[in-house]
Image (tube, rainbow, N blue to C red):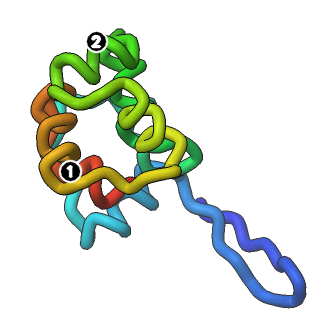
Amino acid sequence: MHDLLHIDGKPFVLVPMHEYRRLINGGNEAVSDLPESVLDRLAARAEHPVKILRKFRGLTQAELATAANISRPYLTEIETRKKNGSITAMQSLAAALKVEPGILLKNA
């Protein structure tokens, strides 16, 4: 069941997060080894996906930066959205976090 809200005179529908994720993925459930709670946090976009996945994998910033061959200050700038991160850096981070690069890019 979905809830209908009116905000500033406009109707909005509340849907469960898993349905929202399916909608933004073109009707397909993403195949992933990530738990629902992590997928929900990624979809909510409240934090940078690199930070969410780093914490989920139990890595410190220093450990992830070393694994991705980038500097820790650069990683901090990516996680705090001060810098977008180069394609090369994002690919390295995705490999270190054991996820497809698209997860980092579409949720950033």
For disc 2, the neighbor class at 10 Å (few under 14, some 14 to 19, many from 20) is some
Name the residue carrying label 2.
63
Amino acid type shown at disc 1: Ala
- Position above or below: 94 against 15: above
Q: Residue furthest bottom?
A: 9
Marks 2 and 1, Cα distance to the nearest angstrom?
27 Å
Question: How far across and down, in percent of the image, does residue 1 sit?
Answer: 59, 60
Give the camera-side residue of 90 and 24: 90
Q: Check disc 1 and report the residue beneath it.
A: 30
Q: Position of residue 15 (x, y in %)?
A: 56, 60
What residue lies at 20% left-to-right and 44% top-to-bottom? 89
In this rendering, does residue 40 appear at all? no
Give the residue type that dot 2 points to.
Glu
Q: Is residue 33 above or below residue 18?
A: above
**Does residue 99 appear left or right of residue 46 in this picture?**
left
Q: Secondary structure at mark 2?
A: helix
In the picture, measured across the screen, residue 50 lies left or right of residue 81, that is: left
In front: 103, or 3? 103
Res. 92 mark: none
What is the secondary structure assignment of the residue under circle 1?
Answer: loop
Q: Along the polypeptide, which appears first: circle 2 or circle 1?
A: 1
Left or right placement of residue 46 versus residue 100 in this view: right
Question: Nearest the camera: 89 or 33?
Answer: 89
**Would residue 27 appear left or right of 79 to someone viewing this image?**
left
Name the quadrant containing residue 4. bottom right
Where residue 39 appears, x then y in whole percent? 37, 40
On screen, 70 above or below 11? above
Which residue is drawn at the image coordinates 85% and 78% (left, top)?
7
Q: Quadrant of residue 36?
A: top left
| Snapshot quadrant of residue 2 | bottom right
Mark 1, other Cα within 10 Å: few <14 / some 14–19 / many ≥20: few
